[in-house]
């Protein structure tokens, strides 16, 4: 672990950029490389997962180490350039790029060290959740990440991390032990419960507002074979109404993520007559004794006759195959929130709106039943404060071409649900305005984040995110 370093230690004065926008000097100071318009790989390098975003940065810095990160941060600060930080590039708002500014690209930081005896891992931010999970699984271990293997670990972690192990092992940040982070003044700090604890508190849910994390230290949990898969159920009110009570009553070893799809894809375990029709896909991970897995999911199966199913013991990383479609780059709109329950009015709204979803690309409503280990942590222990959230609902509409019909549908749909929302997960926010960011952080949490932001980034250099302003 690096000790705290000053700007001068990380970026010797002879390499400081004196002339405005002297990109040649910046390029010469890097161990990585600088990509500019006209370079062969510029157009690929500037892409992010949200295909609706088509920004043309001044340059993209593919950093090779923490010192490159510090050099880039100082250069952006000293030249008043808007700075975007990209890990996996999956920000719904396209925050991983910027028009006319500088992109700090972490894709080449892919180091991973696993200590299976200590059950700890050091990981760099260019890794995806799937890559990390595969490597840890070789030791029968896992860290709880999200639901899609192609997502980068950095943004997912900094926003909280809600995934397949949430009820048994909690959020990703609950497994986070320390970070190495470059702050706006170019320092490389170690933040943990014992070092810069205020900063460590803030990065556990506060997003990329406080610096650029160049290494994460995670706790690893024993996770070997699981019972996983999907039950495909009729798209009825009865099925949706059963989700919360059954999942609430289930053992913590079971976590579920349910998708109500307006048009089922041609899955091999779904009869052809159901292809292209509405379906409820209850996807799950049971991390416990194999013999108990079938009993844990049986109550879902008993609500109605399944239209199809694929339920089997499998290595934990195999669950990511069920959401592999999420790796495809595309344009989409998402609206989401936390709720205490799914009442009959909410279920009626969900079914009615999904029946009229714009038919450009597959649309879905995702429902996650939370609780368990996520709720064991005190609300003020981390910047992610919605520990008592019981249900999360996310509405997604994909499109090609005109976004307006999909945005209108998503806004109307979520607007009908919103009066009963209790907050929102920052990682599931698009570019939805200051008010929605405030919904991600209760008043006391937000005030504490503002104070820490003022201490570590008083000029708001790190603002291409769900931004906490240092006011």
Image (cartoon, rainbow, N blue to C red):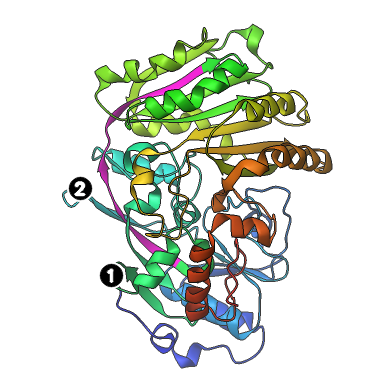
x, y percent for residue 323: 52, 32
Residue 345 location, quadrant = top right
Query: To which residue does mark 1 refer?
Result: 1
Q: Which residue is more in the foreground, 336 or 24?
A: 336
Real-space Cα separation, disc 1 to disc 2, in angstroms: 18 Å
* Residue sitting at x 41%, y 29%: 248
Query: Can residue 183 be seen from the camera position used here?
Result: yes
> What residue sits 45% from the left and 60% below the top?
383
Horizontal and vertical percent position of residue 409: 78, 37
Q: Residue 427 colored magenta?
A: no
Q: Is residue 98 above or below residue 430?
A: below
In the image, residue 14 sits, relative to residue 375, either above or below, namely: below
Proximity of marks 1 and 2: CB atoms separated by less than 8 Å: no
> Quarter holding the C terminus?
bottom right
The correct choice, above or below, for 446 with respect to 385 in the image is: below
Left or right, 414 with respect to 211, comes to right
Give the quadrant of residue 327. Answer: top right
The residue stretch that appears in magenta: 213-231
Q: Position of residue 112 (x, y in %)?
A: 33, 54
The residue that label 2 is drawn on is 116
Q: Earlier in the sequence, mark 1 or mark 2?
A: 1
Secondary structure under tag 1 reads loop
| Rendered location of residue 182, percent (x, y) | 44, 73
Q: Is residue 165 visible?
A: no
Magenta part, dominant SS: strand
């Amino acid at each position: 672990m690096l000790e705290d370093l000053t700007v001068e230690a990380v970026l010797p004065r002879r390499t400081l950029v004196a002339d405005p926008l002297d990109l040649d000097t910046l390029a010469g100071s890097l161990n990585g490389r600088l990509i500019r318009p006209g370079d062969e790989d510029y157009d690929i390098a500037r892409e992010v997962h949200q295909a609706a975003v088509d920004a043309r940065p001044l340059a993209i810095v593919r950093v090779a180490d923490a010192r490159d990160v510090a050099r880039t941060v100082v250069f952006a600060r000293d030249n008043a350039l808007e700075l975007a930080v990209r890990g996996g590039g999956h920000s719904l708002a396209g925050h991983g790029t910027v028009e006319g500014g500088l992109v700090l690209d972490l894709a080449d930081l892919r180091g991973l060290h696993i200590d299976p005896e200590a059950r700890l891992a050091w990981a760099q931010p260019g890794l995806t959740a799937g890559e990390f999970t595969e490597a840890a699984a070789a030791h029968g271990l896992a860290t709880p990440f999200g639901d899609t293997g192609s997502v980068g670990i950095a943004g997912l972690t900094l926003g909280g991390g809600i995934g397949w192990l949430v009820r048994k092992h909690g959020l990703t940040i609950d497994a986070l032990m320390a970070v190495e982070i470059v702050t706006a003044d170019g320092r490389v700090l170690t933040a943990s419960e014992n070092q810069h604890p205020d900063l460590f508190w803030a990065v556990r849910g506060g997003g990329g507002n406080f610096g650029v994390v160049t290494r994460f230290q995670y706790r690893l949990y024993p996770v070997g074979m699981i019972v996983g898969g999907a039950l495909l159920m009729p798209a009825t009110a009865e099925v949706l109404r059963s989700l919360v009570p059954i999942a609430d009553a289930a053992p913590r070893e079971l976590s579920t993520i349910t998708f109500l799809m307006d048009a089922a894809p041609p899955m091999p375990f779904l009869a052809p007559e159901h292809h292209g029709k509405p379906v409820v896909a209850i996807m799950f991970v049971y991390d416990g004794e194999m013999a108990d897995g079938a009993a844990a999911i049986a109550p879902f199966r008993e609500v109605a006759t399944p239209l199809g199913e694929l339920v089997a013991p499998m290595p934990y990383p195999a669950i990511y195959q069920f959401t592999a479609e999420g790796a495809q780059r595309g344009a989409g709109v998402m609206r989401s929130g936390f709720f205490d329950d799914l009442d009959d009015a909410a279920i009626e709204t969900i079914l009615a709106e999904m029946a009229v979803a714009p038919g450009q690309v597959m649309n879905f409503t995702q429902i996650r039943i939370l609780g368990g280990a996520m709720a064991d942590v005190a609300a003020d222990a981390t910047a992610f404060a919605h520990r008592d959230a019981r249900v999360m609902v996310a509405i997604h509409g994909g499109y090609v071409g005109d976004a307006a019909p999909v945005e209108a549908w998503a806004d109307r749909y979520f607007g009908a649900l919103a009066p009963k929302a209790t907050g929102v997960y920052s990682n599931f926010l698009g570019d939805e305005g200051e008010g929605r960011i405030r919904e991600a952080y209760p008043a006391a949490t937000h005030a504490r984040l503002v104070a820490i932001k003022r201490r570590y980034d008083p000029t708001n250099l790190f603002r291409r995110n769900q931004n906490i302003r240092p006011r």
